Amino acid sequence: MAIFLDENSKIVVQGMTGSEGMKHTRRMLASGSKIVGGVNPRKAGEKVEIDGVQIPVFGTVAEAMKETGADVSVVFVPPAFAKGAVIEAIDAGIPLAVVITEGIPVHDTTEFWAYAQGKGTRIVGPNCPGLISPGKSNAGIIPADITKAGRIGLVSKSGTLTYQMMYELRDLGFSSAVGIGGDPVIGTTHIDALQAFQDDPETAAIVMIGEIGGDAEERAAAYIKEHITKPVVGYVAGFTAPEGKTMGHAGAIVSGSSGTAQAKKEALEAAGVKVGKTPSETARLMRAIVEAL
């Protein structure tokens, strides 16, 4: 099985007609995703041909959903317009909105995150690579050719480390991999994905990748201790990061002892999670677990 995304998912791409939207729509199509439409109010009624596939462009997400039965939107809209795009998707009732856009102001993200509460739309991101259920569907920018379907679940703040872990464990494969993004405010959290993997009968073990800054990993550790029975292996990026300096992601900043990689590692280990000091060591820990199952 998979979490959040499967072979029946029908995807619309908000911002499909832009350069990034076109490039990654082509890649999603090539990986087997069902792309049923694009959304651009200025190009409504047009059709875009990508590798021989004619994809209709709709004026709104609501129109695209009505005409195609879409249940996933991938957002490639520039930062200044991203909040409006996500709120439009929420108003249309899309079950899953995957927000790839980087550089969205935190107050905009906070606004659409709060707006989504209780409305039935799961947000993944922003500033994330999206999610993939190998062999079934791919919503975002994760390369589809670096892994295969398998029994490992992966949730990660980092896009690059998502790719590296998928590649390191490519022979074992993944049920789903979810890149949740590294901004200070995000939709789907480590805890959301951990519970979904716990509930998925075909996920046997879970890799969780975090990074310095905030307390998301400590909260995930507490949740794992209370609620997760499947084996979890962890990695926290940023062991050598200098205090007080933002590292890569807007949410990756350490203040005093709060949010350090060491503190997160200790919290995870106290919850029974094996934590690697490098991505490769983390992959070896997971490989040993899977091979023993």
Image (cartoon, grey):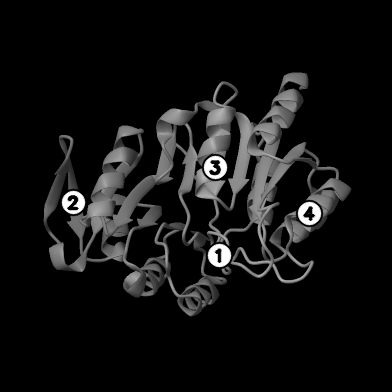
Position of 31 compared to 282: left or right?
Answer: left
Q: Which residue is mark 3?
A: 162
Residue type at tag 2: Pro
Circle 3 residues within 10 Å: few <14, some 14–19, many ≥20: many
Q: Earlier in the sequence, mark 1 or mark 3?
A: 3
Q: Secondary structure at mark 2?
A: strand
Most foreground residue, 234 or 35: 234
Q: CA distance from mark 3 to mark 4?
A: 21 Å
> Which element carries disc 1, helix, strand or loop?
loop
Disc 2 to disc 4: CB gap under 8 Å: no
Q: Disc number at residue 56? A: 2
- The kind of residue on which mark 1 rests is Ile
Q: At numbered mark 4, what does the secondary structure look like: helix, strand or loop?
A: helix
Looking at the image, tell me whether mark 2 or mark 3 is earlier in sequence order: 2
What's the residue at 72%, 71% (across, down)?
Answer: 255
- Residue at the disc numbered 1: 186
Marks 1 and 4: CB-CB under 8 Å?
no
